[in-house]
Image (cartoon, rainbow, N blue to C red):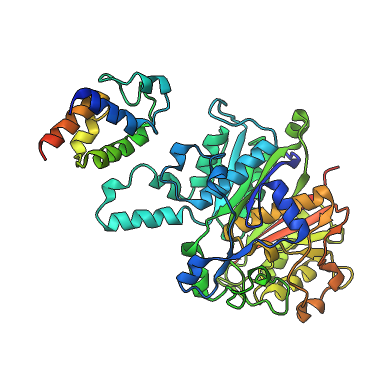
Amino acid sequence: MNKRVVVTGLGVAAPNGVGIPAFTEAIKTGTSGIRHIAELAALQFSCQIAGKPEVPESVQLQYLDPLELRNFNSNGILYGLIAGMDAWKDAQLPAGADVPPDWDSGTIFGAGSAGVDKLREAIYKVDDMQVRRLGSTVVPQTMASGISAWLGGKLALANQVTTNSSACATGAESVLMAYDRIRYGHAERILAGSTSDAGPYIWGGFDGLKVCTFKHNDNPAAGSRPMSASASGFVPGSGAGALVLESLDSALERGATIYAEVLGGHMNSGAQRGDGSMTAPNSTAVQRCIREAIKAAGVTPGEIDAINGHLTATGKDALEIENWSIALGRKGKEFPYINALKCMIGHCLSGSGSIELVAAVLQLHEGFLFPNINCEDLHPDIAAIIDPEKIPQQLLYKDLNLIAKASFGFGDVNACVILKKYK
Amino acid sequence: MDKETLIAQLKEIVKPYAKNEEGLLNINENTDFVNDLKINSANLVDVILDVEEQFNIVIDNESMERMLDVRSAMEIIEAKLAAK
């Protein structure tokens, strides 16, 4: 069985927009969601700016009832619920306690960690010999599969309900795993996505690794600078993106809006050999991942219209561009358009791939390229490989047919998804 | 404390967890937390923690196990209060 797979629903909780309309407007206008975070300053972080979706209690109550919100302290699950439930609703699929189990619908919803704030609360209680006072809320908010479990219950998902985890490649991986499950006929619909917690206990490790910028604490919106000569580390982010993947047959039968087709992709690892390590990518593996993705999609490198890069704003951006250029055999004016959403939302870690895939699908569906902000001083090593015109700094309306989206993660893992405009 | 007052206090405690409003409205000594109020069984531990806080008592594991309805809850609370 080799079914065609399409995207029929989108949802997002991003630092620069919660909900698809706000997010679409933000990415078109180049609006940054990066803010100064007083808590990070108080805790003496080097990087005191970050991206965090704004979700007031009134919005939380649209996704969780008052009982569920009692002792709720897991923002990653909250972001995932917003993105996932919105995507399901966008696809006009039924939700709620009265909906019977849907054996043909599941979710593969990734996370890097779960409920780290909740876990912190629990650890303090346990160490204080108060384990009996933990109550019922710790496990569902801190288990790695928490987000998929919550979504499964809200949406009556009765096919596979699981959480994948591959660092910053998590979101792209979830889409490819969902694609496979539908393609082989094991499910009709999979809610694919990923989420990342926000806050000092997630971001602290990266601050400690010295991979975040400390040079823009007084100018947050200019802090995340992918492809820029003055890029000095990534800005930590958080949030979630979600895509309803569905067999084309099912989508047509339901008369669903089809945002794009998933042609396939590839996942691999550089095995932390050669120039690859726990924290750095093996270029051979990256190039191979891109080439294999294109092969799996049944297209040629010359057909790719645009790339949605991983591009985090560390010293590795030029290397990523070089890898794309070698993998595609294209450079200069022949290189596809490329953009990096992290310029507006920072690096949303395990949530990044999904949020960026939502942006890529919107670009295909509506025919535009969102602007790359903060790279007015394009890195000379990048300008030496590709024509600067291929890195739009203003919103560009353009009919696009094929977008390649790649995400790379710690552990030397890679994932590349090929998306096509549905015609 | 008279029974009516105790039941009224228990009613307030279980209110956030009770999924059956009618059961909550008619709460009495015979009300079963799970069957009549449709409280999720996982939330029973939360009810017990809220009871402990409200009455400033500590409910041991054996008492917790049998605190499944209003009658047993009242017995346990009264016994713990008397032992204070």
Q: Position of residue A179 (x, y in %)?
A: 68, 45
Q: Position of residue A392 (x, y in %)?
A: 82, 66
Residue A229 occupies quadrant: bottom right
The residue lying furthest to the bottom in this view is A380
- Viewer-nearest residue: A278 or A403: A403
Q: Position of residue A203 (x, y in %)?
A: 51, 65
Q: Decide if residue A136 is on the left or right side of residue A24.
A: left
State the residue at coordinates (45%, 70%). A43
Q: Quadrant of the C terminus of chain B?
A: top left
Report whether residue A218 is seen: yes
Q: Is residue A212 above or below residue B76?
A: below
State the residue at coordinates (57%, 47%). A80
State the residue at coordinates (36%, 32%). B41
- Viewer-nearest residue: A268 or A259: A259
Report whether residue A310 is seen: no
- Viewer-nearest residue: A266 or A53: A53
Q: Quadrant of the N terminus of chain B?
A: top left
